[in-house]
Image: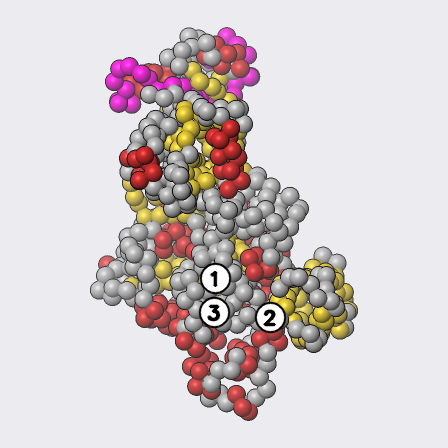
């Protein structure tokens, strides 16, 4: 069996130092925890755990016994690994490691890396810290009720324990449809099934459990996925209450509109404060708002003061692919975090390229194996690694380079030893990890092209996979992932969508208990990607803001999130798209959510429910159509309708022709009294932008001030689109608005 080279990073925490006895002769103060990688045993029966432990112990220096302890009263042998790697963790000195290096079967060893507390890692990535700052100041969302419309929930999962949870608020009117109410507690205060009314709202697949725990899961230590990303799992608002409204089929992922409407109707009645919907129409199934049940129900929720967070869709990077684009909803796109689960490709020419994969194999080929790119004479994206191509080319025992669209089972059936999955040019740098039936690594388009060039440069190309494990600190994060749906909005192009982006790539959160078929390992957390994952992040953050500012309207919360969003990555450069170019507003919206800044935005753009009526009339909807959305008696002929861009929105989407265009906005001071703000414009080539007035002042809190922005095309350009930015600056405040300009 092939030897294994794996560099896996674990978190191992130890007790305070206690005096003890060691059997080693070297300096005990130099002891550190090493991850040791060894070949799998080639002979004998090692199916039993004790036999494998004996094999691992055989690598320890003779001065260390199997039960040896160090001065900290800790065992020198820390962990045995059966599935993730062939090897073990032990507390050793550098001299002892040198002794081990001489033994047959030894591969390598390195000092363990200590990782910081991470959940799906996102709270820390978003600047939320358990004992300080906004998380603590917002009481972790205490008292706020988040209603999740999804595929149900796994009620016994530890993420939904109710330790330290207060009872439901007195206003709560919801129901628990688990047998005898046994599935509900002070965390899950309601659960109903609107798909199959006679059945409990149990999540038989995992999607609803994942989104619910992302929004409001409680602290769970030791969460990981197949031994990776080990840490403490926690949702954005860990003290918020949850109410599950099952409206989606667990198995095929469909959500009947009638069921969703019934779920939203009940949620409004029950008294939720925030609604989280990781659902929506399919690609290019755009519906006018008056014909879109979700848009209509969401408006009714907003009228009741309920904040609605909803996913933008997974149909990117094509333009006009964004769904759920009504202006009264927060439409959430997806971005990366700074955590990755790294596997490298080491080529025969000694070049090494990083990719990502889930670690679940004990037979990863760490030695150089033949590398092949199966193509036929008239190869295309659909024929590369197809069953027909694999039959015509020998891939047995080889590392196989395939385009992402391949079915890994086909490569396994053809005898491939491992697989390198490369993106196409459209997907670019976006990497989404997933389980596979054979060892694999997912690489970017540019890396894939480099590997192809190497294959074409030699008659005997080879490659090996080197597993490095969980790595924190990717400086290009956050970046926009390819699948995140892009604007402009088809229904209302005068409203910039998506509104904001949040973590949605390789997110680890609660899952219904399942068994991984390859390793036969039970797991209760899973890693998945999508705007389904970014949406509940924003739902939880909205709950924190609702707890900290109970008097803020849904539009005020939305404005605070948008005008404080980050537009630069950890490296201090503009947030990038999947092609390594700066992301435009139709991909990133206002930017990447920054919860702590949103708690103190300085100014907000507020919108009351009735303010949407002139906007809807301006869409040329009939009175009946507008009434169907907002309720009550509406006669557009008796009111002044407004253009889309005139809605008091925190961002701008301008369709600019040869004539100047002026739009108006009103900001409300939610910061200290007696502040003055100065406007700052970053204008693009070919467009002149003027602000009137360019300075605004406030003498009291909640005071409103209006201003106007005039756009004038100063010269023709060769582009159909450009972008700009407007900021209001005052001391620590920078109230930012992205501007998308389409030339007509």
Residue 522 image offset from top left, x and y in percent: 31, 39
Q: Is residue 257 above or below residue 434?
A: below
Magenta region: 22-49
Residue 649 has which mark? Answer: 2
x 42%, y 15%: residue: 106
x 75%, y 73%: residue: 692
**Which residue in the structure is indicated by mark 3?**
306
Q: Secondary structure at mark 3?
A: loop
Tag nearer the camera, 3 or 2: 2
Marks 1,2: beta carbons within 8 A: no
Marks 3,2: beta carbons within 8 A: no
Residue 366 image offset from top left, x and y in percent: 42, 24
Q: Secondary structure at mark 1?
A: loop
Q: Is residue 300 above or below residue 233?
A: below
Marks 1,3: beta carbons within 8 A: no
Left or right of 378, for residue 33: right
Relative depth, front residue between 154 and 292:
292
Mark 1 vs mark 3, CA separation in Å: 26 Å
- The answer to if 38 sits in the magenta stretch is yes
- Looking at the image, tell me whether mark 3 or mark 2 is earlier in sequence order: 3
x 48%, y 20%: residue: 109
Q: Is residue 724 above or below residue 123?
A: below
**Which residue in the structure is indicated by mark 1?**
321
Q: Sort mark 2 into few (<14), some (14-19) or many (20+) by Cα contacts within 10 Å.
A: many
Q: Sort mark 1 into few (<14), some (14-19) or many (20+) by Cα contacts within 10 Å.
A: many
Mark 3 vs mark 2, CA separation in Å: 18 Å
Residue 564 image offset from top left, x and y in percent: 63, 59
Q: Sort mark 3 into few (<14), some (14-19) or many (20+) by Cα contacts within 10 Å.
A: many
């Amino acid at each position: 069996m092939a030897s294994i080279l794996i560099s896996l990073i674990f978190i191992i925490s130890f007790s305070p130092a206690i005096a003890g006895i060691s059997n080693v002769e070297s300096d005990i103060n130099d002891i550190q925890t090493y991850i040791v990688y060894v070949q799998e045993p080639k002979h004998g029966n090692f199916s039993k755990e004790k036999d494998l432990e004996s094999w691992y112990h055989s690598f320890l220096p003779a001065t260390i016994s199997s039960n040896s302890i160090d001065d900290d009263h800790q065992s020198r042998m820390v962990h045995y690994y059966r599935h993730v790697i062939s090897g073990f963790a032990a507390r050793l000195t550098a001299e002892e490691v040198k002794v081990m290096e001489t033994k047959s079967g030894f591969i390598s060893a390195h000092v363990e890396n200590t990782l910081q507390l991470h959940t799906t890692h996102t709270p820390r990535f978003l600047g939320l810290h358990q004992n300080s700052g906004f998380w603590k100041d917002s009481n972790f969302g205490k008292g706020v009720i988040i209603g999740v419309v999804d595929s149900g929930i796994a009620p016994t999962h530890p993420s939904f324990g109710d330790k330290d949870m207060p009872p439901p608020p007195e206003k709560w009117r919801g129901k628990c449809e688990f047998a005898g109410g046994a599935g509900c507690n002070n965390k899950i205060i309601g659960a109903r099934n609107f798909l199959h009314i006679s059945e409990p709202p149990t999540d038989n697949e995992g999607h609803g459990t994942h989104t619910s725990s992302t929004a409001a899961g409680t602290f769970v230590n030791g969460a990981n996925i197949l031994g990776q990303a080990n840490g403490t799992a926690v949702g954005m608002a860990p003290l918020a209450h949850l109410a599950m409204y099952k409206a989606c089929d667990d198995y095929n992922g469909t959500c009947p509109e009638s069921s969703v409407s019934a779920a939203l109707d009940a949620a409004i009645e029950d008294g939720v404060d925030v609604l989280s919907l990781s659902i929506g129409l399919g690609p290019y199934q755009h519906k006018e708002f008056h014909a879109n049940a979700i848009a209509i129900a969401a408006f009714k929720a907003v009228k009741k003061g309920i904040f609605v967070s909803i996913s933008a869709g997974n149909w990117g990077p094509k333009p006009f692919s964004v769904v759920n684009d009504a202006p009264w909803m927060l439409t959430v796109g997806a971005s990366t975090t700074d955590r990755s689960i790294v596997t490298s490709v080491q080529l025969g020419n000694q070049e090494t390229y990083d990719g990502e994969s889930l670690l679940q194999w004990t037979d990863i080929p760490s030695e150089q194996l033949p590398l092949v790119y199966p193509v036929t004479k008239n190869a295309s994206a659909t024929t590369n690694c197809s069953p027909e191509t694999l039959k015509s080319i020998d891939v047995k025992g080889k590392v196989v380079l395939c385009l992402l669209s391949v079915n890994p089972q086909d490569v396994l059936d053809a005898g491939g030893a491992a697989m390198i999955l490369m993106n196409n040019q459209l997907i670019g740098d976006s990497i989404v990890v997933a389980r596979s039936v054979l060892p694999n690594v997912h690489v970017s388009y540019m890396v894939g092209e480099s590997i192809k060039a190497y294959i074409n440069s030699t008659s005997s190309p080879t490659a090996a996979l080197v597993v490095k494990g969980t790595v924190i600190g990717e400086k290009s994060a956050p970046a926009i992932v390819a699948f995140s749906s892009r604007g402009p909005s088809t229904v209302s192009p005068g409203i910039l969508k998506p509104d904001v982006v949040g973590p949605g790539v390789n997110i680890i959160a609660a899952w219904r208990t399942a068994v991984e078929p390859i390793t036969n390992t039970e797991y209760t957390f899973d890693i998945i990607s999508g705007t389904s994952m970014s949406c509940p992040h924003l739902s939880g953050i909205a709950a924190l803001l609702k707890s900290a500012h109970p008097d803020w309207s849904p539009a005020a919360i939305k404005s605070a999130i948008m005008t404080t969003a980050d537009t630069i990555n950890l490296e201090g450069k503009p947030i990038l798209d999947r092609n390594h170019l700066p992301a435009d507003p139709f991909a990133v919206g206002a930017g990447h959510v920054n919860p702590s800044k949103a708690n103190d935005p300085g100014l907000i753009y507020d919108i009351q429910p009735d303010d949407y009526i002139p906007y809807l009339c301006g869409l040329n909807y009939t009175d009946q159509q507008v009434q169907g959305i907002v309720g009550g008696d509406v006669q557009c002929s008796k009111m002044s309708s407004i253009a889309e861009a005139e809605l008091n929105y925190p961002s701008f989407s301008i369709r600019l022709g040869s004539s100047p265009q002026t739009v108006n906005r009103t900001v409300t001071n939610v910061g200290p009294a007696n502040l003055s703000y100065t406007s700052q414009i970053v204008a693009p080539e070919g467009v002149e932008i003027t602000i009137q007035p360019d300075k605004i002042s406030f003498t009291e809190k909640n005071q409103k001030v209006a201003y106007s922005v005039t756009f004038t095309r100063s010269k023709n350009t060769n582009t159909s689109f450009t972008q700009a930015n407007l900021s209001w600056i005052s001391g620590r405040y920078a109230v930012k608005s992205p501007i998308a300009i389409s030339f007509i």
